[in-house]
Amino acid sequence: MIPTRGASRAAARDAAPLAGDQPGNRALLKLLPKLPEAILLALTAIYVLEVVTVLPIQYIANAAHDDALFIRLAESIKAGHWLGTYNNVTLAKGPGLSLWIAITTSLWLPLRLSEFGLYLAATWVLVRALRLIGWASWPLLALSAALVLHPVMIVSLGRVGREAIYTPLALLVLALLTLHVAVRDAPLKRRIACAAGLGAALAYFWITREEGLWVVPGLALGLVGVVALGWAAGARGWPWVGREMLVMITIGAVSVLSVLCVAMVNKAYYGVAEIVEFKDQAFLDAYGALQRIQHDHWRQHLLVPQEVLHRAYEVSPALRETQPAFEGPVLGWTGHGCLAFGITPFGGRCWCG
């Protein structure tokens, strides 16, 4: 039987490779799942060029408790003297930013570029973790664009301040916690590596500012959630319990030991085993004692008015030694606090918080 022309064309189509099997199409199909990351990279390049390399960093040289302090401590670290000569502001703020400035400038990296690079790295880890969990490409693209183009980093990068790395570090902790959830069924080595990264990020976050406690409830919820998901999936037995305990111990050990290392260095140099002196028990006891004194006219945010201080001077020789400090040039700071809270203090002076 002689085949017809239509039958010949049908046979030719059947013999030809499918469109998806063409080399060019196969490459395109492989690229599609990575489209959010590719677009994120393009947005990053534009953002870095337009913002990071154009806008200047504001450095307030006479900000002895902020910009100037961070730079001075960074220079001391680079010189090998840790935080330098001890004075009333040496341990006033965590050394996270000063360490960051010392490391990045030693590597000849522009400060703004390094800060934004940390933010981009945290964004990338979060996007990859959400992809592993099962998020679709376009929601990931929307999230990537929202994070990369968010104006918070423009504000944070405008000055030499801790917010420029504190925001990326907070995002990195969230991203690594999400990754910890995403790899809960992965091999133990991969989970340990993720746990160590989470512990290190948490430690650096902790030594950067003083109010890091706010991240603990969410972190605990995520860690408990991983165990709950494993239990719900039918994981049982001592081997599973041992693996989960090892992962938890890794997170805790890396974070706690890293913070303790910084505290021990402070102990060796300055005799204070704390990241900042505001958390030293002696300071907390003294501050609490002052706040327990009854006010003649109690007002919100007016923690220790002058009347309370003078009452305490009369009964405490130790506090009386600090009177020149409380009533010296430092009184200029009290005006900022009172102005911020709209307080007109009795006697014209106060300590607001």
Image: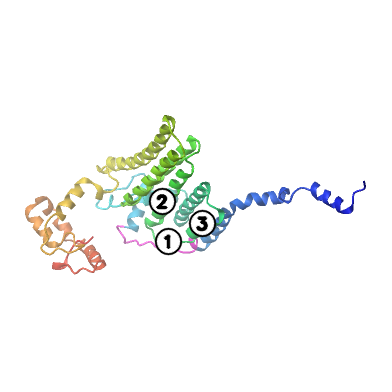
**Circle 3: element type:** helix
Q: Position of residue 304 (x, y in %)?
A: 16, 59
Q: Which is more foreground, mark 3 or mark 1?
A: 3
Query: Farthest residue in the front direction?
Result: 1
Q: Is residue 350 left or right of residue 105?
A: left
Looking at the rendered structure, the kind of residue marked 2 is Leu
Dot 1 surroundings within 10 Å: few (below 14), some, or many (20 or more)? few
Q: Main secondary structure of the magenta part?
A: loop
Residue stretch rendered in magenta on the structure: 51-65
Of labels 3 and 2, earlier in sequence is 3
> Which disc is residue 152 wearing?
1
Dot 2 surroundings within 10 Å: few (below 14), some, or many (20 or more)? many
Nearer to me, 320 or 258? 258
Looking at the rendered structure, the kind of residue marked 3 is Ser
Judging by the rendered image, the residue that carries numbered circle 2 is 169
Q: Residue at x 55, y 58 (%)?
A: 45
Looking at the rendered structure, the kind of residue marked 1 is Val
- Please say if 133 is above or below 139: above
Query: Farthest residue in the left direction?
Result: 314
Please check the rendered image and state whether residue 254 is part of the magenta-colored stretch, yes or no.
no
Of labels 1 and 2, earlier in sequence is 1
Please check the rendered image and state whether residue 57 is part of the magenta-colored stretch, yes or no.
yes
